[in-house]
Amino acid sequence: MYQTIKIIIDGKECIAKKGQYIVEAAKENNIYIPTLCNIEGVKPKGACRICTVKVNGRLMTACTTPVAEGMSIESESAELTDLRRSIIELLFVEGNHFCPACEKSGECILQALAYRYSVMAPRFPFMFPIRELDASNPKIIKDHNRCVLCKRCIRVIKDDEGKNIFAFKKRGHKVEIIVDPESADKFTDELAEKAMEICPVGAILVKGKGFKKPIGQRKYDLMPIGSDIEKVSKSKKAVL
Amino acid sequence: MNKAIVATTSLAGCFGCHMSILDIDERILELIEVVEFNKSPIDDIKKFTKKCDIGLIEGGCCNSENVHVLKDFRENCKILIALGECAIMGGLPAMRNGIPIKECLEEAYIGGPTVQQNHQKIVPNDPELPILLDKVYPCHEVVKIDYYLPGCPPRADLIWKALIALVKGEEMDLPYEVIKFD
């Protein structure tokens, strides 16, 4: 049996299981806290900071912070919405995210978050960094232009011995994801498919494969991200 | 009611956003009841003949002429709207932003696989031609932009609803489905 505790999220009293992370507890109470790097069932990393909430007045990442008795959590305030929007905008200007030309458009979490938070244009100047397209791997294309360094591929994709197939290369702002050439033979078709699937953006693409669903019918084309958690069919209105 | 005066232009764009304006279909008859077009490719007026209320900008700035036209629009329009991904973030033309301009021109006019007739290896250099910028700039990095309508192209319903709301001074009621980046 889990020990249940009471927490408050945005003024609403919620029941949570002890030891549960805040995002999970919120989800079970039909409250959506946005996440980008987080992936269910995998140890959280807190890399993207989009899930930042205020716990008893202090900023914390909801994906890495376990719930505790008496926590008062603030998530949908004007301040936090602006903070989240600024993170989305920073991610957009930091890479080269050309949505109209991207295979993942409509199923991209970064884009879906921009839709949800009505990001019409970033407040920061575009950096247009010079990044390469790495097609050296026989199974996948790695487009560094679109990578948001969420580490999902590193954390999820392991070979049969449990070793990482993806890894970080270089340091600081030059850091990029590579596929370990040594383990190329252990990188199966299934793993490649999975890598493409768990990549929140269009940075990992399986070679020789088109996307089946046309634009207009994709996951986030009709419903905002998080609406399945909120379980209310609300058509979010944009604020221009 | 006085008609609102609208001007439109396509800078470094593909005219897709203008096609999307026409995609409002028969509502264009309703539109001309409430707006009057000034400088625009739609009525082929080349120069501003009066001050405008709304300027719709398609495309980003890739050369000196784009910057000139955009500044002219800012001067002559009360409200400027960046229409579509290219105006907002440079779009496909901005894919050249990581490549030095010299390499771009050489690829296009001298060494590219589709270049066949340029035996003298001339890169167009007539003084009449606008100078290319070092990179493609989104409109809001050149002048102040008041509203953004994203999409490639922006959905006709988005353009329609935004324009009508602006003209009639109503709140914009934009459903989730109409705001898309693709």
Image (cartoon, helix red, strand yellow):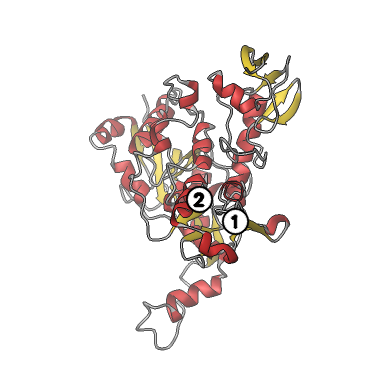
Q: Give coordinates of residue A193: x percent, y percent.
A: 45, 51
- Residue that numbered label 1 is attached to: A166
Task: Please state if A56 lies on the left or on the right of A217 as rendered.
Answer: right
Name the quadrant containing residue B52. top left
Please, is residue B20 above or below residue A4 in the view? below
Residue at horizontal 42 percent and vertical 42 percent from the top:
A106
Distance between the Cα atoms at labels 1 and 2?
10 Å
Q: Give coordinates of residue A170: x percent, y percent.
A: 70, 61
Name the quadrant containing residue A40. top right
Q: Residues within 10 Å of mark 1 (few under 14, many from 20)?
A: many
* Same chain for the residues under marks 1 and 2 in the image: yes
Task: Please state if A210 lies on the left or on the right of A33 as rendered.
Answer: left
- Residue that numbered label 2 is attached to: A195
Q: Nearer the viewer, residue B26 or B64?
A: B26
CB-based contact (under 8 Å), mark 1 and mark 2? yes
Q: Chain of mark 1?
A: A
Q: Nearer the viewer, residue A53 or A168?
A: A168
Name the quadrant containing residue A181. bottom right
Between discs 1 and 2, the one toward the N terminus: 1
Residue type of the residue flagged with mark 1? Phe
Q: Secondary structure at mark 1?
A: strand
Q: Give coordinates of residue B145: x percent, y percent.
A: 54, 42
Q: Secondary structure at mark 2?
A: helix
Q: Chain of mark 2?
A: A
